[in-house]
Amino acid sequence: MIFYPEIKKYAENFKMEGSVIGIDKIENGHINQTYVITCEKADGSHIRYILQTINTKVFTDPRSLMENIKNVTDYLKKIIAENGGDINRETLTCIETVNGDIYHVDEEGRYWRMYNFIEGTTSYQTVERPILFENVAKAFGKFQKQLADYPAETLHETIAKFHDTVKRYHDFEEAVKNDISGRAKDCQKEIEFYLAHKDICGEITSRIATGEIPLRVTHNDTKLNNIMIDNETDEGVCVIDLDTVMPGSALYDFGDSIRFGASSAAEDEKDLSKVYFVPELFEAFTRGFLSEAKDALNETEKDFLPMSAILMTLECGMRFLGDHLNGDVYFSIHYENQNLYRARTQMKLVADMEAQLEDMKAIVAKYR
Ligand code: ADP
Ligand code: GN1
Ligand code: MG
C-alpha cells in the first residue's frame, strides 16, 4: 500500500470509523481521482472507504451532482430494504463530513466526497467469463427497474446532452476544424472514418424527439468497471459511478455496456488484430438484460438495441478522437496518444458490429 500523506487530511474531513492507516490510489476511471482509505478501529479491525475528488471541469455543478447522488442512493436504499436486500452493499452510501455535509470543499476549491467501500467485490476491466457479463446485464437491468418510478423531474442534468450523438458529432467536427494541438494531420484515416458516420448519429435522438423512444431514469455510463461484482457468486452487487444518473434512454445503458464489455480487448489496445466484437458476449448481455427489462421496454427500444451498441461505440470513439485533437483535456491519459488508441479500438468495434448487425438482430429476436 502506497501512502499518500497529502490526502489524509482530506479524508479526515469525513466521519470515518477509526483512524487512517493506509491510502491507495485507483487508476481505472477516466474522470475522477479515486483513493481507497483504510482505517483501523479501536478493536483492531479494519474498515475501508472510497475518497474521490469530483472532476469539476467535467461536472461544473458539483453541488447538484451530489444532491442527485444522495437522493438516488437514499431512494435505492428504500427499495432494496423493501425487497430484503443489503442496503450497505447493494448501493453506495454517502459518508457525511464532520460538518454534516455530503461533500467537502478544500482550500483550492476542489470538491471531495466519500463512500462506503463495497467489500468482497471486484470491478473488472474485461469480461473474463461470459457469465460475468450476463450478471452485469441483469444488475444494470435491475438498476433501471429500481429507478423506474423515481421522480425524474427532480434530477439535475449533470452533463447536458450527454448522449446526444448528433451534438457529439458536431463537437467532433469542431475539434477537427480547430485542430488546436496540430494532431489532425497524423490521424486523417481515423477522422474520415468518424465523419463518414454522420448519417446514423440521429437514429436514437430523432426517435426520442418523436416519443417513439421514451426517456427514463438511466445510468448513462454503464461500463463494466462501474459495477462491483461479488467475488464468490459472480453476481453484480452494486452499480457505482452515479455521476451521470439522469433522464436518458435505456438504449444508452445497453449500448454503452456492449461497447466496453463485448470487446475482445482493452479499450486502449494498440494491436488492432486483438480487438474484435464478440457475438457470444453480446448474446450473454442481451439475455441478461432482457430477462430483467423485457417487460419495461417498448418494441422500438427492443428494435434498436443492436443499433444502440453501434451508436454508443461510435459516439465514444468520436469523443476520444475529439479529445486527442483538443489536447487531452477531458479523459485522463496515462501515456501519449492514449486517446488515439482508444478511438481506434472503437472504430474496429463499430466496423465489426456493422458487419454483424443482422446477426445481432437475430440474437435480440431470440430473447425479446
Ligand atoms: P470514474 O468516474 O473516474 O470512473 P468511479 O466512481 O467509477 O470513477 O471509480 C473508479 C474506480 O474505483 C471504479 O472503477 C472501482 O474500481 C473503484 N470504486 C469506486 N467506488 C467504489 C466503492 N464504493 N467500492 C469499491 N470500489 C470502488
Ligand atoms: C468515462 O468515468 P468513467 O471512466 O466510468 C466517461 C464515459 C465514457 C468512458 C469511456 C462522465 O467513464 O462517458 O464512456 O469514460 N464518463 C464521463 O471509457 O464522461
Ligand atoms: Mg467509472
Image (spheres, helix red, strand yellow):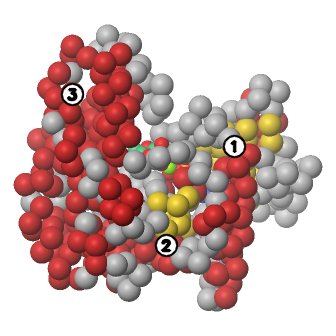
**Residue bearing the label numbered 2:** 144
Which image quarter is the N terminus in? top right
Decide which of 158, 347 is in the foreground and name it: 158
Amino acid tagged 1: Pro
Splitting the image into 4 quarters, where does residue 79 fall?
bottom right
Quarter, ligand 2: top left
**Distance (Cα) linking label 2 and label 3:** 35 Å
Amino acid tagged 2: Gln
Q: Is residue 276 left or right of residue 38?
A: left
Mark 2 surroundings: few (<14), some (14-19) or many (≥20) residues within 10 A: many
Decide which of 34, 191 is in the foreground and name it: 191
**Distance (Cα) linking label 2 and label 1:** 23 Å
Mark 1 surroundings: few (<14), some (14-19) or many (≥20) residues within 10 A: many
Amino acid tagged 3: Ile
Judge whether residue 217 can be spotted in this image: yes
Q: Position of residue 101 (x, y in %)?
A: 85, 51
Residue drawn at x 21%, y 49% is 200
**Residue bearing the label numbered 1:** 62
Residue drawn at x 13%, y 47% is 351
Whichever of labels 2 and 3 marks the residue nearer the N terminus, that label is 2
Whichever of labels 3 and 1 marks the residue nearer the N terminus, that label is 1
Secondary structure of the residue carrying numbered label 2:
helix
Q: Position of residue 337 (x, y in %)?
A: 32, 23
Residue drawn at x 34%, y 69% is 212
Secondary structure of the residue carrying numbered label 3:
helix
- Tell me if label 2 and label 3 are in contact, CB under 8 Å: no
Q: Is residue 171 left or right of residue 112?
A: left
Q: Position of residue 294 (x, y in %)?
A: 35, 82
